[in-house]
Image: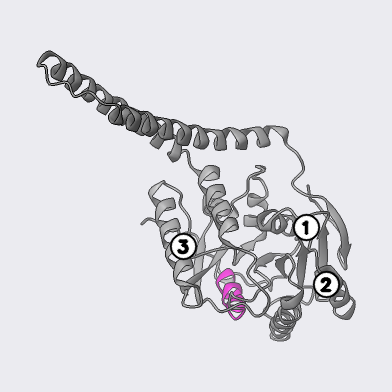
Amino acid sequence: MNNQILSDKNLQIRETIPSLTIVVPCYNEAEAFIYCVQALKAIITDLVSRQKIQQNSHILFVDDGSKDNTWLQITEAAKQSHYVQGLKLSRNRGHQTALIAGLSVVETDICISIDADLQDDTKCIEQMVDKYMLGNEIVYGVRNNRSSDSFFKRNTANIFYGSMSAMGVNQIENHADYRLLSKRALAALLEFKEQNLYIRGLIPLLGFNSDKVFYTREERVAGESKYPLKKMLGVAIEGVTSLTVTPLRLICALGFLTCFFSFLAIIYILIAKFTGQVIEGWSSVIISIFFLSGVQLLSLGVIGEYIGKIYMETKRRPKFFIDEKTNIKLGHWE
């Protein structure tokens, strides 16, 4: 499995203390928010006090159209601390779009994205900053232990990463959206304008020097998972159709094999007819019809998924609209 994209070329140790933005997408995270903001404020305060990051570093919470009081808690936290900023989208647009919305207003030297459930180890933030100072533009947070996940989730994740790799998608295994991006890497990421976002698959395409930090995935600090099976399947389909055309090639190969075996079946039928060994019956015919119909419908479904992606891309609609903000001045965004 070729997921090794790390490079030690042209690494130059940085001497200037960076400013940091921690971007946190939130959707109905009212129960987890208080724990999240406390943990991240403690990290920011500690790193500032030890002069690892600049005083203007902060946390940016992006409310992805929550239906609970998540935004109210964000605004209250922003009033109490200059380290907290908030951005509210006009409606729910999904985790990846919310993350891009937050990243698009970042103006600090580096940014780190992390989920509000605190399943990702916040202690890795300092390690990420250290690896940035060594000259890396991207630092991936990689889970080396998923014991907190259910048996089903662990195994489906392994199948997903294996399948994506087999189809030629170069992504970091067991890495979600916990990562550090330098200003240079972030600017490159924002050059990708597609509507169908699969950020964890786009980052490796940037090609900048990168490294990894490893951590053990923990249980959610509070609340329920925002990624049930339906959403996980949606992310998987998004990743496949956004980054590879292998399914279309598989359809072509399947069509070729079907034609090949059909040709052999025709030869067999002709031989049977001329030798007088024809067996009358409709079962074989019905089975063949159902099989070929299933192949055709499956193929049309995959092709339709790609056509739907093309349709949405050609519209070039805005990815999101910002409804409210707190403690921040909006820079560039779309």
Which of disc 2 and disc 3 is earlier in sequence? 2
Image position, residue 247 (x, y; %): 44, 39
Under circle 3, the secondary element is helix
Look at the image and say whether residue 129 sits in the magenta stretch.
yes
Asked which secondary structure carries label 1, the reply is: loop
- Residue named by callout 2: 74
Where is residue 300? Give x, y as percent. Answer: 50, 32
The residues bearing labels 1 and 2 have C-alpha atoms spaced at a distance of 17 Å
For image coordinates 58% across by 75% down, the residue present is 130
Q: Name the amino acid, label 3.
A: Ala
State which tag comes first along the sequence, 3 or 1: 1
> Pointer 3: what residue?
157
Q: Nearer the viewer, mark 3 or mark 2?
A: 3
* Label pair 1/2, CB-CB below 8 angstroms: no
Task: For label 1, count other residues whose C-alpha is less than 10 Å away and answer few (under 14), some (14-19) or many (20+).
Answer: some
Report if residue 227 is visible in the image: yes
Mark number, residue 31: none
In the image, residue 266 sits, relative to residue 205, either above or below, namely above
Q: What percent of the width, then of the height, locates residue 277?
A: 12, 21
Q: CA distance from mark 3 to mark 1?
A: 31 Å
Give the tally of numbered discs: 3
Q: Amino acid at mark 2?
A: Ile
Q: In the rendering, at what x and y percent does residue 112 appear? A: 65, 67
Which residues, given as a range, are shown in magenta? 122-132
Q: Residue at x 51, y 64 (%)?
A: 175
Question: Does the magenta run of residues contain 207?
Answer: no
Side (left or right) of 267 relative to 218: left
Disc 1 target residue: 105
